[in-house]
Amino acid sequence: MKEVRPIDQVENTVLNALGHLGISYRLMHHEPAMTMDDLAAVDRELGADHPKNLFLCNRQQTTFYLLLLAGHKAFRTASVSKQLGVARLSFAGPELLWKHLQTKPGGISPLGLMFDAVNHVQLLVDRDLQNSEKLSFHPCVNTASLVMAGRDFFGSFLQSTGHTPTWVTIESDVSIT
């Protein structure tokens, strides 16, 4: 049975897990950040951009996905659904987010995959992120952010959770003026 932690303990649980894995990170506490715009100053301070983290599900709410994409890109349901060969995806609600990743809206993070011991959540990652030198994430709370090496996230962290990324292509919006 999955242990459920109060939100104030989730950050410490994530940081302790990173420490046990020997993953170095730099942590910064900040005002609550609900949007990518809220993170602009944090990203400058940490020297790495936060990917967008979207928690998605199928219409029946039986299959769950965590999509990581570059912050400047837009999520197109039809494009991702087609690449996965599934019907239309939608955003999963806060109760499901807490149940599977032990976080709340605004704190969505792939670090929450450590709480998904039975792999109900499939990790989807934009191909443009696969060679990132550094990645920044919330430690499952939106009042802190950390930066870690991309190789540590895609290597030892994901290996410890049993999650393997499915690579998807998210096209950049190109404006013609």
Image (cartoon, grey):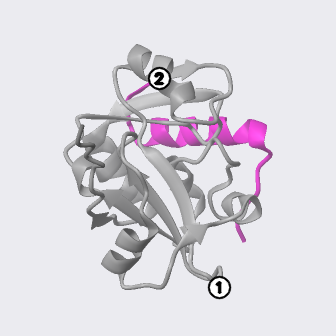
**Mark 2 crowdedness (10 Å alpha carbons): few <14, some 14-19, many ≥20:** some
Pinpoint residue 16: horizontal percent, then vertical percent.
Answer: 56, 37
Q: Is 16 covered by the magenta stretch?
A: yes
Q: Earlier in the sequence, mark 2 or mark 1?
A: 2
Question: Could you say whether the residue bearing mark 1 is in a helix, strand or loop?
Answer: loop
Q: Residue furthest front?
A: 177
Q: Nearer the viewer, residue 25 or 90?
A: 90
Question: Could you say whether the residue bearing mark 2 is in a helix, strand or loop?
Answer: helix
Q: Which three-letter amino acid code belongs to the residue tagged 1? A: Gln
Q: Quadrant of the C terminus?
A: top left
Chain part drawn in magenta: 1-26
**Residue found at x 43% / y 84%:** 86
Q: Which three-letter amino acid code belongs to the residue tagged 2? A: Ala
Picture layout, residue 112 above or below residue 81: above
**Mark 1 crowdedness (10 Å alpha carbons): few <14, some 14-19, many ≥20:** few
Q: Nearer the viewer, residue 86 or 107?
A: 86
Find out whether the residues at labels 2 and 1 contact each other: C-beta distance under 8 Å: no
Residue 110 visible somewhere in the drawing: no
> Label 2: which residue?
40
Q: Quadrant of residue 6?
A: top right
Q: Quadrant of residue 120?
A: bottom right
Residue 97 visible somewhere in the drawing: yes
> Label 1: which residue?
60
Q: Quadrant of residue 38?
A: top right
Q: Quadrant of the N terminus?
A: bottom right
**Residue found at x 41% / y 73%:** 78
Q: Nearer the viewer, residue 71 or 173?
A: 173
Q: CA distance from mark 2 to mark 1?
A: 35 Å
Q: Is 92 covered by the magenta stretch?
A: no
Pinpoint residue 55: horizontal percent, then vertical percent.
Answer: 56, 60
Picture layout, residue 94 above or below residue 51: below
